[in-house]
Amino acid sequence: MLKIKDITSCLEELAPLSLQESYDNSGLICGQPDWEAKAALLSLDCTEEIVNEAIETGCNLIIAHHPLVFSGLKKITGSSYVERALIKAIQHHIAIYACHTNLDNVKQGVNQKIAEKLGLRDLKVLLPKQDQLRKLVTFVPGTHLHSLRQALFEQGAGHIGNYDSCSFGTEGTGTFRGNEKSRPFLGKPMELSQEAEVRLELIYETAHEKRMLETLRKNHPYEEPAFDCYPISNSHPEIGSGMLGSFESALTETEFLNLLKTQLKTNCIRHTSKLNKPIQLVAFCGGSGRFLLNQAIARKADAFVTADFKYHDFFEVEGKLLLADPGHFETEQFTPEIFYGCIQNKFPKFAIRLSKINTNPIHYF
């Protein structure tokens, strides 16, 4: 029997909750992790209509990109759509889960889906995050070096850019003495031991520290393995905001805007003046990406696609690229497809449904 936590843990392997921004509220909004998961409804937003759809289709789990509860609630009286949706979900024993900025911040998340729709390749994170990497240092006898190192590699340690299985080892001598309760792998209790060891160093993602240390303890021969975890300031090339990608062949500005209209299913795109320049390198960010404008310009992008630009923000582009704002919903509408693929790959027999409701609150006349 699958539980709610089995499904949400699957999503958190893709987009760990530790990667959400400080202002966000990703995770389980209501419901219990140990409830049975009967079926899941996937959507961009969670509204009253979405809760009704879950009830009608027999889904007791709603997975949305945007959190239903974003800021604190002091009362739940049904005076707003948030309160009414929450009350109805609780009444019908429906769990609600949000996977928001943590999904924005992983390379396999929201922006990769945009790239897929537009046919962009050679993808790179536009603004990589720092403080997302740590270095694990431990000391192991040479007889167990390979098996321990391999176990850590299998858990994701040792990835640096386009390389995996990266580590460094230095031979040396370790000393230790166990008390009368110890059961040392080498030496005897109450006796000072000097043993040949290898100092093993590997990089890992901070979000995966728990499983790294569990793997270390499980595969290290010592009763009490010595280890250090160092924070490092290197930026993570696959974690961060926005993305850069290239077309195989450059497009004209009109061809590019038409492509956006077709692939993002919209008839209206706000944009800056055309510059009569080809479009090949594109910066893009699903949702509100105003904060990435300077980064897009600095990375020499020909165009920047994002949403929620205000009137005066358009002036700041200053003819340095073509800015296209198709809308918030339009740039994130395919996010439920990410949820679908992630869950289906791990639980192919679990019932999952893509919502049929368009939750975009903005209409154009």
Image (spheres, rainbow, N blue to C red):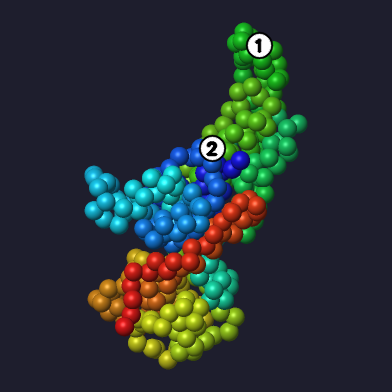
- The residue at the point 34 percent across, 69 percent down is 361
Q: Where is residue 218 drawn, in percent x and y?
A: 65, 31
Q: Nearer the viewer, residue 200 or 182?
A: 182
Q: Distance between the residues labelled 2 and 1?
A: 30 Å
358 to 159, vertically: above or below = below
Q: Earlier in the sequence, mark 2 or mark 1?
A: 1
Q: Where is residue 89 drawn, in percent x and y?
A: 39, 49
Asked if residue 258 lies left or right of residue 70, the reply is right
Q: Which residue, given by chain and number where applicable, does mark 2 sit on?
A: 210
In the orientation shown, which residue stands out farthest toward the right? 143
- Quadrant that contains the N terminus: top right
Q: Where is residue 216 drawn, in percent x and y?
A: 62, 34
- Local packing at callout 1 (Cα closer than 10 Å; few below 14, some 14-19, many 20+) is some
Amino acid of disc 1: Pro
- Quadrant that contains the C terminus: bottom left
- The residue at the point 51 percent across, 57 percent down is 57
- Local packing at callout 2 (Cα closer than 10 Å; few below 14, some 14-19, many 20+) is few
- The residue at the point 48 percent across, 50 percent down is 61
Give SS at disc 1: loop
Asked if residue 34 lies left or right of residue 166, the reply is left
Amino acid of disc 2: Lys
Question: Can residue 347 be seen in the rendering of this structure?
Answer: yes
- The image quarter containing residue 215 is top right
151 to 226, vertically: above or below = below
Q: Which residue, given by chain and number where applicable, does mark 1 sit on?
A: 189
- The residue at the point 48 percent across, 63 percent down is 355
